[in-house]
Image (cartoon, rainbow, N blue to C red):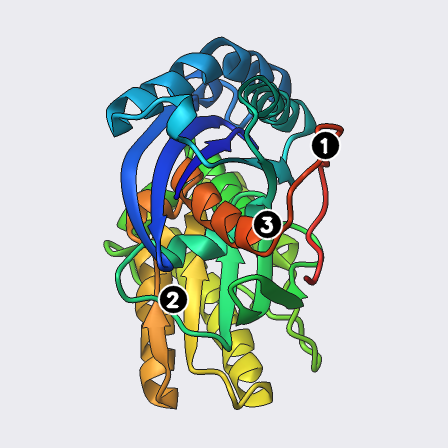
Amino acid sequence: MKILGIESSCDETAAAVLECEDGKFTVLSDKVASQIEMHARYGGVVPEIASRAHCEIISKITYDALSDAGVTLGDIDAVAVTAYPGLIGALLVGVNFAKGLAYANGKPLVAVDHIKGHIAANYISKKRPEPPYIAFVASGGHTSIVRVDGYDSHTVIGGTRDDAMGEAFDKVARVMGMPYPGGAAMDRLAYEGRAILPFPSAAIRDDSLDFSFSGIKTAVLNYINSTSQKGEALNRADVAASFCRAAVSSVSTKLSLAAERNPDITAIALAGGVAANSHLRDEIEKLCKSRGLEFFCPDKKYCGDNAVMIAVAGYFEYIKGNIAPLSLNAEAARFEDV
């Protein structure tokens, strides 16, 4: 069967065609229109600009994806679309476009949770994690620890109580004068510095599996401001290395605790835009080796927002019989244990 995936939850408009045979996936096309240049001047995503840009390009991106795959809408078995969570205006563009396609062509409509989509990016490769396993999902808007008991069964067991991990990276990078988005630049710069600055852990000091990235972000910003007020030179590389070390160690601490509390898991998987961070990949891979667990992480091109992951997640919703009504509406904040 063939699934058309559509993604518009933030600042990427994406469409993809996925072929699914016996649980194995073949990517027939993968189109993404990024809005990074539009938002860079503002230092972050402007929701209204994002929504308008989606409106302008979503039709072309979708039909380009169909063309690249060598198929027509008549060959598609279902239309999967990100319905939640995300920027409400951006989501509405994708949801309403997908509803129109599904209705006009008599195709089933499948609503996909964006977070489950990120987790599903781990299933695109030939080798994929087998449930039960733990997934750590982190991006500019989300940070969650999820127990995965089946490809359609997820339970949130931890997460951030305030800022998302990716947001903290971007805000710190912005203050240091790096272009938006700053996560990748921070990752590279950290290799040039020394992790010698005592920034606090983002791992909340209790028996939960939760984080607070607002504290470490504020500590870094205060250090940068204090250095400037004293007229001292700022060693940006040391700041980047110390921040990365503190943030990544925080994740390792909580994932280690999650592994202890879930002795039946077989693997830990990373997902979301922050999963592209090489320091995080290296640290969690080491953690997995020390605990005898398998380590999984999507190809970097599938860590950020894309429609392939939405099509994969949509496939599992479709075979479960979760067909969305044409009254489907977008929701800005939602991630349920299902």
Q: CA distance from mark 1 to mark 3?
A: 23 Å
Is 256 above or below relative to 282? below
Q: CA distance from mark 1 to mark 2?
A: 51 Å
Among the two numbered marks 1 and 2 on one chain, the one whose residue lies closer to the N terminus: 2
Q: CA distance from mark 2 to mark 3?
A: 28 Å
In terms of secondary structure, where does tag 1 sit? loop
Numbered badge on residue 142: 3
Residue drawn at the location 27% of the way across and 29% of the way down: 69
Mark 1 and mark 3 in contact? Answer it, CB < 8 Å.
Answer: no
Which residue matches tag 1? Answer: 328
Q: Residues within 10 Å of mark 1 (few under 14, many from 20)?
A: some
Which residue matches tag 2? Answer: 196
Quarter of the image with the C terminus in it: bottom right
* Residue 72 percent across, percent down from the top left: 36, 22
Work out whether residue 135 or residue 18 is closer to the camera in this orientation and state it: 18
Residue drawn at the location 76% of the way across and 28% of the way down: 327
User: Which amino acid type is marked by label 1?
Assistant: Leu
Quarter of the image with the N terminus in it: top left
User: Which amino acid type is marked by label 2?
Assistant: Ile
